[in-house]
Amino acid sequence: MRELYPAIEPHRTERLPVDALHTLYLEECGNPEGLPVIFLHGGPGAGLSTYHRRFFDPARYRIVLFDQRGAGQSTPFAELTDNTTAHLVADIEAIREHLGIERWVVFGGSWGSTLALAYAQAHAERVLGLVLRGIFLGGEEELRWFNEFDGGARLIFPERWARFIAPIPEAERGDLLEAYWQRLTSSDEATRLAAAHAWSAWEGGSTTLVHDPDAGGDFDDPHKAVSLALMEAHYFRHKVFLEPGQLLRDIDRIRTIPATIVHGRYDIICPMKSAWDLSQAWPEANLRVVLAGHSAADPAIVDALVTATDALADRWFRAPMA
């Protein structure tokens, strides 16, 4: 089993203004002369973690990471104005141009896989390869699966589900997304923070294959909880700012790009069907289904992702692609 590469620190960080309102936090790690790759984090709103740098061989990759609009160290924090999928796609392209990169690998998991597909379909000529994990296509069935009563996730994690719905009166539970939205945008700070904590605990505690249902989750930090909950609710209310079926409809635009799709068989947040649907529309991509949940830190997923990034580096260094 492959493991993450050793921890590394950025050799360069900066703040990149992308319009009159938003400024992105941007960092680079690894080899400045290596194969360029951009890492797209999940959520929306989850922001970067230090382990995100470690999926790539630092001797062979020029690793670019950034906090998406409203997330992490980007400013303004948790800002929803001019924050759509199209804006994020434009930001990725602005980063590429700013750094003087001709073509790069695009790596994204969960919401990052959605964004990676949207970017690649808009700018296929700039993408050398794709590594996608925990596929989320933004469809109605996916949106309802995890956050509504007619979905199935509540049947898998009933303990966590009970805590998720506890802040919402029974009369409002027919539309939990809207009920949470009203609280996440409340004028009362305590109400906003309580809703953000409950939302992020439901998701952040449901990611791994083996876990304690009473333990804390990945988004316990209040700063991260607020951006995750508010941003996800914003995007989900707008069907992630994509047309129905758009990412499958436009697959021909990226059909010839080398791609690996990694998905946990027991992913409860983004069910396996999304990866299957993507692979059926895109048989040229390499689908790897592993014994894991949703988390990129699950050992089988780490193994598959590092294997995929190493394979792309091997290919590039044998025959560099102009």
Image: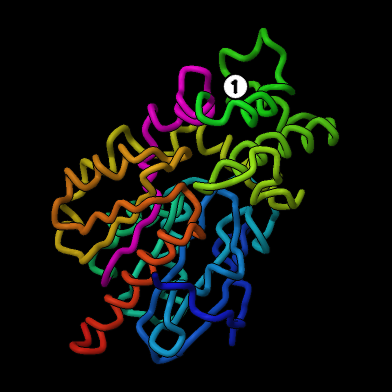
**Residue 7, above or below 83:** below
Who's the residue at 64% across and 62% down the image?
Answer: 74
Q: Position of residue 255 (x, y in %)?
A: 16, 57
179 on left or right of 3: right
Q: Where is residue 246 in the image (x, y as percent from the top left)?
A: 28, 40
Residue 322 visible in the shown view: no
Who's the residue at 45% across and 90% down the image?
Answer: 32
Q: Please state the total of marks drawn on the protein image.
A: 1
Q: Position of residue 72 (x, y in %)?
A: 66, 59
**Looking at the figure, which quarter contains the C terminus?**
bottom left
Q: Camera-side residue: 77 or 81?
A: 77
Q: Camera-side residue: 274 or 234?
A: 274
Who's the residue at 72% across and 32% down the image?
Answer: 185
Who's the residue at 41% across and 75% down the image?
Answer: 97
Residue 62 visible in the shown view: yes
Q: How crowded is mark 1: few (under 14 residues within 10 Å), some or many (20 or more)?
A: some
Q: Camera-side residue: 316 or 291?
A: 291
**Residue 102, above or below 297:** below
Residue 133: in magenta span: yes
Residue 219: in magenta span: no
The residue under label 1 is which amino acid type? Answer: Leu
Magenta residues, start to end: 128-154
181 on left or right of 126: right
Name the residue furthest top: 171
Question: Which residue does the numbered mark 1 point to in the structure image?
Answer: 176
